[in-house]
């Protein structure tokens, strides 16, 4: 084959890769399961960032609703909490994680997408003044605020119920 013919063939092969060949196959799909943390790994990441947590039962057993568990929490949820702490410059305390006892569904505590954050004047002010108010949630009428990345902060009386939608890390 002449050099003149080889070039168009090479360009066509490159175009095929970019438009649907191997490159497209390497991109994760939107339905890929998010990366998860173990209890110990989540605690380490949160502690390193200065995020604290409390448990009414002084435990971390995922199957006990009195505990605050991070077992099977999405890495992106932990990253979201850490990003929130950095952006707000507030002391951030998690009061609930992946333990049983919360509402079910795809974007639930159990599935690793949600945490509850302790109310404080700093946290409350940051959410209500820096995030976009998007209305009341159906059912419990909790006021909701949305971050630029799409995460939703809902005021549930005694805490902020936060759903981290962003992709897995």
Image: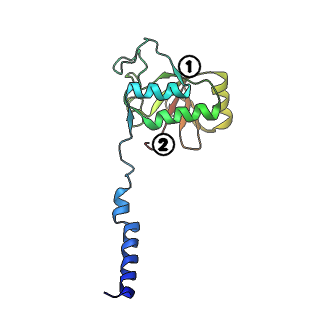
Q: Residue furthest left?
A: 1
Q: Position of residue 89 (x, y in %)?
A: 65, 30
What is the basis of the colouring in this image?
rainbow
In the image, 27 versus 142, the foreground residue is 27
- Crowding around mark 2 (Cα neighbors within 10 Å: few <14, some 14 to 19, many 20+) is some
Task: Please state the total of marks drawn on the protein image.
Answer: 2
| Above or below for 131 versus 69 | below
Instruction: Tell me the residue that label 1 is attached to.
Output: 158
In the image, 150 versus 19, the foreground residue is 19
Residue that appears at 64% across and 32% down: 88
Instruction: Tell me the residue that label 2 is attached to.
Output: 166
Q: Earlier in the sequence, mark 2 or mark 1?
A: 1
Q: Position of residue 99 (x, y in %)?
A: 39, 23
Q: Position of residue 46 (x, y in %)?
A: 50, 27
User: In whole angstroms, how far apart are the C-alphas of marks 2 and 1?
Assistant: 25 Å
- Crowding around mark 1 (Cα neighbors within 10 Å: few <14, some 14 to 19, many 20+) is few
- Label 1 secondary element: loop
Q: Position of residue 27 (x, y in %)?
A: 38, 55
The reply to whether residue 84 is in sight is yes
Residue 132 is marked as: none
| Above or below for 96 versus 154 | above
Residue 108: image quadrant is top left
What is the quadrant of the N terminus in the image? bottom left
In the image, 22 versus 111, the foreground residue is 22
What is the quadrant of the C terminus in the image? top left
- Label 2 secondary element: loop
Residue that appears at 47% across and 40% down: 165
Q: Nearer the viewer, mark 2 or mark 1?
A: 2
């Amino acid at each position: 084959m002449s050099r003149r013919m080889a070039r168009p063939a090479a360009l066509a092969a490159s175009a095929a890769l970019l438009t649907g060949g191997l490159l497209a196959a390497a991109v994760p799909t939107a339905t890929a399961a998010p990366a998860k943390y173990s209890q110990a790994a989540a605690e380490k990441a949160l502690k390193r960032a200065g995020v604290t947590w409390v448990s009414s039962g002084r435990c971390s057993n995922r199957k006990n609703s009195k505990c605050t568990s991070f077992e099977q929490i999405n890495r992106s949820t932990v990253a979201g909490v850490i990003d929130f702490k950095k952006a707000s410059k507030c002391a951030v305390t998690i009061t609930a994680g992946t333990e049983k006892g919360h509402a079910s569904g795809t974007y639930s505590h159990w599935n690793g997408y949600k945490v509850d954050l302790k109310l404080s004047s700093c946290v409350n002010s940051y959410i209500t003044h820096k995030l976009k108010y998007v209305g009341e949630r159906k059912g419990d009428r909790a006021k909701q605020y949305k971050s630029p990345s799409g995460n939703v902060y809902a005021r549930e009386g005694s805490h902020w119920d936060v759903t981290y939608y962003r992709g897995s890390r």
